[in-house]
Image (cartoon, helix red, strand yellow):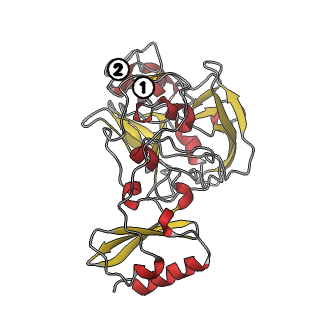
């Protein structure tokens, strides 16, 4: 029987550690699978600002078979059954194949804080431990435009070339502007407009931040999402800030975009100085971080207003705009995935019209902004 003895030894060791029984483990199928936008129950009305964070939801029953540890490998299961066991701070998932339990995977329990609750029970996740893990000091900045407060801190980073720099960066995504529903097709260039995860402003207001198209994030007219910026008078302002080094014209561009006065869109050069454990210890489906570096990157996902027009990638993916255009319809972002604890130091391409996150960096006391 495949993997029986290795798995039996593992569960025996976990049981000796005195962990909880498997009966309290979440439904592995429900936790792992992602829901469609329809299942997420998006509202058709725009939420009020500072909406309530109260949790509401339905309790759903689990169909998972949960044998005891001693029965797990001596009971011939039915194909398709699944079960789980807990130990050592992890949840182990098992699937029945050819009437035998096999193919386990493990997920850190503290990473299931949990967007799965949204998918299954329409609940809001617990964000209390978002900033835990960082031993440094978080400061607080109040945006004078709307009174919102953000945690920020002094980041001490090193580049791939061995140089060091410190700068002040927000520890959470920007949340500025008026929420618009994902069904919106007409936008107002006179107003900063954001989308919120599953059209629920609670998420914008509770550290997910707003989701913006590239032009919106850059504080440029909507037309700049579909034309080359140097070909349109309404978009050209950003081209005056770029450098001349081939392939890296936007490496060190200081562009305010929709950030508050005295702050700018975190640029490619600043991201190059980011190393270490920068992902949050909550919400990631796999490979959650410990936030020792303080940036607390969470898997907000993306909204793509084309094709099936769905919010996708929550619990698995995060992208953050930088001030760099690739071509008429694409710009650059920094991306993070649950499949790996690493991030791309080099920008990846995203469709300008996709709605993703923004991080802001302070202009002052920033050597990377001076040269």
Q: Quadrant of the N terminus?
A: bottom left
Check residue 5 in the rendering and tell me which mark sits there, or answer none.
Answer: none
Picture quadrant of residue 78 = bottom left
Q: Which residue appears at 40% of the width and 50% of the height?
A: 60
Which residue lies under the disc numbered 2? 223
Contact flag, marks 1 and 2 (Cβ < 8 Å): yes
Q: Quadrant of the C terminus?
A: top right
The secondary structure type at the circle numbered 1 is helix
Q: Compute the Cα span from label 1 to label 2.
A: 8 Å
Q: Position of residue 190 (x, y in %)?
A: 45, 12
In screen coordinates, is 332 left or right of 128?
left
Q: Position of residue 270 (x, y in %)?
A: 59, 41
Circle 1 packing at 10 Å, graded few (<14), some (14-19), many (20+), is many
Residue found at the far top of this picture: 190
Circle 2 packing at 10 Å, graded few (<14), some (14-19), many (20+), is some
- Disc with the residue nearer the chain's start (1 vs 2): 1
Residues 17 and 278: in front is 17
Q: Is residue 355 visible from the viewing direction of this image?
A: yes
In screen coordinates, is 272 left or right of 302?
right
The answer to whether 74 is drawn above or below residue 255 in the figure is below
Q: Position of residue 87 (x, y in %)?
A: 55, 71
The secondary structure type at the circle numbered 2 is helix
Residues 129 and 72: in front is 72
Picture quadrant of residue 122 = top left
Q: Position of residue 227 (x, y in %)?
A: 32, 25
Which residue lies under the disc numbered 1? 215
Q: Which residue appears at 35% of the width and 25% of the height?
A: 44
Residues 189 and 121: in front is 121
Q: Is residue 239 visible from the viewing direction of this image?
A: no
């Amino acid at each position: 029987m495949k993997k029986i003895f290795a798995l039996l030894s593992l569960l025996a060791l976990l049981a000796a550690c005195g962990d909880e029984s498997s009966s309290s483990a979440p439904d592995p199928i429900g936790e792992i699978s992602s829901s469609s936008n329809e299942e997420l129950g998006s509202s058709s009305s725009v939420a009020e600002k500072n909406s309530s964070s109260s949790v509401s939801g339905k309790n759903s029953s689990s169909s998972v078979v949960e044998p005891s540890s001693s029965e797990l490998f001596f009971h011939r299961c039915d194909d398709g059954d699944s079960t789980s066991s807990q130990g050592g701070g992890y949840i182990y998932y098992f699937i029945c194949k050819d009437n035998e339990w096999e193919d386990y995977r493990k997920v850190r329990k503290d990473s299931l804080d949990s967007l799965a609750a949204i998918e299954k029970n329409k609940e809001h996740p617990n964000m209390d431990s978002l900033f835990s893990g960082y031993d440094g000091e978080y400061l607080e900045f109040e945006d004078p435009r709307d009174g919102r407060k953000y945690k920020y801190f002094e980041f001490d980073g090193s580049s791939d070339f061995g140089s060091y720099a410190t700068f002040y960066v927000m520890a959470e995504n920007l949340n500025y502007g008026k929420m618009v529903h994902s069904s919106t097709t007409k936008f107002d260039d006179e107003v900063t407009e954001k989308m919120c995860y599953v059209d629920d402003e609670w998420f914008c207001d509770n550290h997910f931040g707003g989701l913006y198209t590239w032009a919106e994030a850059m504080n440029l007219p909507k037309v700049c999402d579909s034309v080359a910026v140097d070909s349109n008078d309404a978009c050209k302002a950003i081209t005056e800030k770029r450098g001349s080094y081939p392939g890296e014209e936007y490496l060190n561009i200081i562009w305010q975009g929709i950030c508050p006065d005295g702050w700018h869109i975190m640029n490619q050069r600043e991201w190059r100085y980011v190393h270490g454990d920068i992902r949050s210890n909550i919400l990631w489906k796999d490979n959650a971080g410990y936030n020792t570096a303080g940036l607390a990157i969470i898997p907000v996902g993306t909204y793509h207003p084309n094709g099936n027009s769905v919010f996708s990638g929550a619990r698995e993916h995060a992208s953050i705009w930088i001030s760099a255009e690739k071509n008429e319809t694409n710009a650059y972002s920094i991306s993070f995935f649950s499949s790996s604890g690493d991030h791309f130091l080099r920008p990846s391409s995203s469709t300008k019209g996709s709605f993703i996150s923004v991080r802001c960096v302070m202009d002052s006391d920033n050597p990377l902004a001076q040269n």
